[in-house]
Image (cartoon, helix red, strand yellow):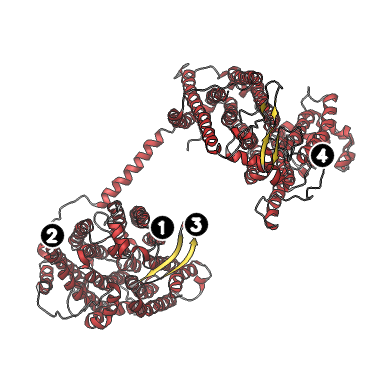
Amino acid sequence: MEILILNLTPFILSLLFALPITQRIGKPVQWGWATGTVMTTLFIISLTLLPQILENGAFSTTITWVPELGLQFSWYVDGLSLMFMLIVTGIGIAVFLYAGYYLDDPADLARFYSYLSAFTGAMLLVVMAGNLILLFIAWEATSLTSFFLIGFKGAKYEDARIGASRALVITAAGGLAMFVGLVLMGTAGGSFEFADLLSKDAGKLLRDHAWYPAMTILIMLGCFTKSAQFPFHFWLPGAMSAPSPASAFLHSATMVKAGVYLLFRLYPTLGNTPLWRDVLLVIGLATMTIGAVFAIRKRDLKGLLAYTTISMLGTFVALIALPHAEGLKAAALGIIAHALYKGTFFMLAGTVEHATGTRNLDELGGLRKLLPIPTAIAFTVGLSMAGYPPLVGFVGKEYLLDAMLPQTGIGIIPIALVFISAILNGTAALLFAWDVFISRPDRQYDHFHAPPFGMHIGLIGLALASLLFGVLIAPLLDPLLEAVLGKHPHLHLIPTEINAAVLLSVLALVGAPTFFILRSLWMPMKGIRLLSGAEIYAGIIKGVESFGDLLLTSQNGKLRYYLIAILGVVAIMMFLGGYEVARPLSIIFQDPVTDILKLTMIILAIGATFASIIIRAHVMAVLALGVAGYAIGVLFLLEPAPDVALVQILVETMVTVLIILMVARIGILQRKKAQDLLWKGTKKWGQFGIIRDAFISIVIGGSVALFAIAAVNDRDGRIQQVKQVASEELPLSGANDILRPISLWHLQNAYPKTQATDVVGAIITDFRGTDTLIEIMVFSVASLGLLTLMTLPVGREVLFGENMDELMKQVAKERFPDQEEEVINLDPTKRSREYYRKVTDKYQFENLSTPLTRTVAQIVFPFALLLSVAQILYGGSAPGDGFTAGVVSGLAVASWYVVFGYFEARLRLRWLHAGRLIVAGLSIAFINASLGLITGGAFFGNIAFDGGQAPADLHLTTSVVFEFAIYLVVFGGVVSIMNAISHPRDLEEWGL
Amino acid sequence: MNIIFAIATGIMFGLGVFQLLRRDLIKMAMGFYILFTAINFFFLAVGVFDGNVPAYVAPKDDGVSPLYLDNGEVVARDIGMTDNPQPARPSDPLVQALLLTAIVISFGSFALLLGLINVASVRFKTLDSDQVNNLKA
């Protein structure tokens, strides 16, 4: 329950602030207090978990999410999680309150709170996630919200946009690397749950696993990018274009510590190995030193703070590197201390900028009198940062130095680097506190305006916490660290004995002010100019862009080259695939008579296709293509596959009609020009183009042939296998001999399950009914799409229904001026046939519209409908089904369009509305398919309506209804296509 | 025989590709249709072959149907000439069903393709695909 509250509240808050209505309630400052209160509540709820964890250890909760994929929402909350939860909610109190005073514009603030709350939720989820996948999702969510916050002022400043995208690219790329690592870890460990992975056995298993180096390095990559470790550190200074409260929250106290958190979390599982120690120690110490050296040279306040943050993050990573968990206590304490003082410092930088309009150290100074409270806060947290007693930073630094002493076998270099970084960090703290508030006391500010007191409240709280946690360290932090480390930490402010660490600590206390006072000596020194990470990143991005430009030059915009490229690649792949499996040919002739017929048909099909290529005239080529199609239809019939043959022959007819109508729509001049292109070479290539195309065709055709042969041979082999397997049990004859088990199953079950003797029909309407449903949807979309394509985009009016009558009236006015009254006022349905003929004869194919053809068309139409009905009803036991029925009816309509012309055909068939047919068909199909669900079966479950009592071969089942639905859709689709292609091109064609 | 079908698939496909690479858009559309046909050939080659009766299974032995059900098993009657009887073999019904839908879909998509060519010819005033080069942004 507490877990759900903790996780959901921030997201709800985020949604609330995203709503325009919420933004009207209250004032910004009130929002600050309200959100601060929410954060306080969350903080207290987190705190109540502490006794529970101390007593029982970690606890986890699980909610099933996608059980099929093994995914579940699970939470794993132990001391470490709790420490981070307390930091997030605790610093959150101050940040949310501060933001209410910092941002003045309500719209800005609402947006800011929305992002910030979402981030809070994501960050809490990161530290509470009990599942690796959930952790990854939350992890990327923090990257995303961070992107929005860095780019908060992106509309105005380019820096913000660059910084935001850079941070996102780097952290998200690292996150992806980490994802691979997490998947490796989950697979190797046999579980994606922390509860399992953190056990001793799982740790041993994973550390000895062959994948250990890969998963560890990948996970580390995610942590290094997130926690701004060298060489990925450069995104963090760029992230300083975020508003100061966001910087304080995300880029110092919480989000950048996610990497540290994960390393800390996985220490029991992956840690304490040479690889772990070496990588983390080198990267951590390098980051720590580089951050500290860069920090003191920065003149921008937030830049200075960003680099000290990088330095401290490096320190934590180095501490986690230490073997035998020696550094974990110092790391935990350091994380708490750092969150308290660095978060405060970032908000102080915000206050200073808010008051003076600048954050440049060179333009600041002497603010002691103008900003007395911030001065006090700065010195309190500054002393903590520099490690002075009695603040918590002092204890942190002492434990840090103690852990880094050479006794753990890491040599003298780490302690030397840590000591130097400690002095430099102390110097940076003094630079901030002293140079902003004390030195140059006479500096004047032109646009100074004093910050409201409320702005300081959160900061005072944090500064007091830094002090209290130092003075009362044992009672306040002992229980928490005990929960984190699993043993009593024995924290103390005053060292109990004088050892090397204490001496070094005192030395650093003296060293930092000394180095600070001598700043006039080292400040003017020129730093060594190194190629910075940001420049390398910019170079990479530029490289990607120029590579994209290079790729773009290969785009010449000519359709054929794209086709060549696509088909060529496919051909190569098919060649390679076919080459491997193709085996010597085995030509088996079964039945000489049909085989000779088949061979003839194949030769006819290929010959006709070849003719369609070399014939120049379009219409002739189309007819040749039609011949090829019919030859294939006959082939199907010989196979024998009567259902397919019927569809093939009908569709072929349809297609031939379609192409001829379509070709006729295109102007003769254009067609003539295109036809002349056929064997003409280009200027540049000459006749080479033909040879090139022929070569490509031969290569592709050869690959396909090879592939087909491989497939055929493979099937032969498969059949042999099936035979061998089945030979024990099945008597082999006929069907069982040549069919794969799935096809045999269809033969066996077609009648018992669907009352259809036609197995193909049963598969279409029942066994694979969903396929067919999708298929008729595709068909209807294609046909309606064609209608849209042909009627709308060229600026034509759609001439159906009402506006068609209008048009008729105009035609009548022109052509029958004497009968105007009579014609116009007549009900359209009562007009005489003669009238229609006179109006419409102009738009008919002269030589097709004879009395004979008109009579034939009229007679054919009802018979076609009758034939369709018969095919639907007997689809289960004879060739023909909804498809063929639809095409038959469609052909009849097509003949009307050809014979009567568009105008008259539309007038006579005004009841025939393609869209309605399709909608009705699809609705019936869906309702029919769902009936199975209602009666307790499955989607597309078969129901016999007549209880098997109907005459033989005529069974009323859901299959028949589905056939009817298919019929409606196909019929509607064909009508829609006919409408589209015979629709007049423009109104001029109508004589208007 | 099915090997011959496989080779025919390759020849049809090659012819289709050649036709597809013409500059004339109408010829190009025909190329697409030849490719559809080639793919039907392919199905024929690898799936529907070696049968001698249609895939119709009678519910029980009626003395006529070449294939009938007997206790859930498909039984094949001997067919053909009396001196050379062969057991009835249906072609694979599953592949036929796939072919059936493929033919109808290729019809729909071909119609759409023709529509596109029509629109292109109205908009660009040409059927030469090399002159329709405004596709490049």
Q: Mark 3 belongs to which amino acid?
A: Glu
Q: Which of the two discs, 1 and 4, labels the residue nearer the N terminus?
A: 1
A231 lies left or right of A42:
left
Marks 1 and 3: in contact by CB < 8 Å?
no
Q: Secondary structure at mark 4?
A: helix
Q: Nearer the viewer, mark 3 or mark 1?
A: 3
Q: Amino acid at mark 2?
A: Pro
Which of the numbered marks, if any, corresponds to residue A68?
3
User: Is residue A985 among what the camera can see?
Assistant: no
Quarter of the view holding residue A206: bottom left
Please give the name of the residue rendered at 18% of the width and 80% of the height, measured from the top-left corner: A493
Q: Which residue is mark 4?
A: A809
Q: Which mark is residue A155?
A: 1
| Separation of residues labelled 3 and 2 (CA atoms) | 65 Å
At 81% from the left and 45% from the top, the residue drawn is A950
Q: Position of residue A231 (x, y in %)?
A: 24, 54
How packed mark 1 is, by other alpha carbons closer than 10 Å (few <14, some 14-19, many 20 or more), is few
In the rendering, at what x and y percent does residue B136 appear?
48, 35
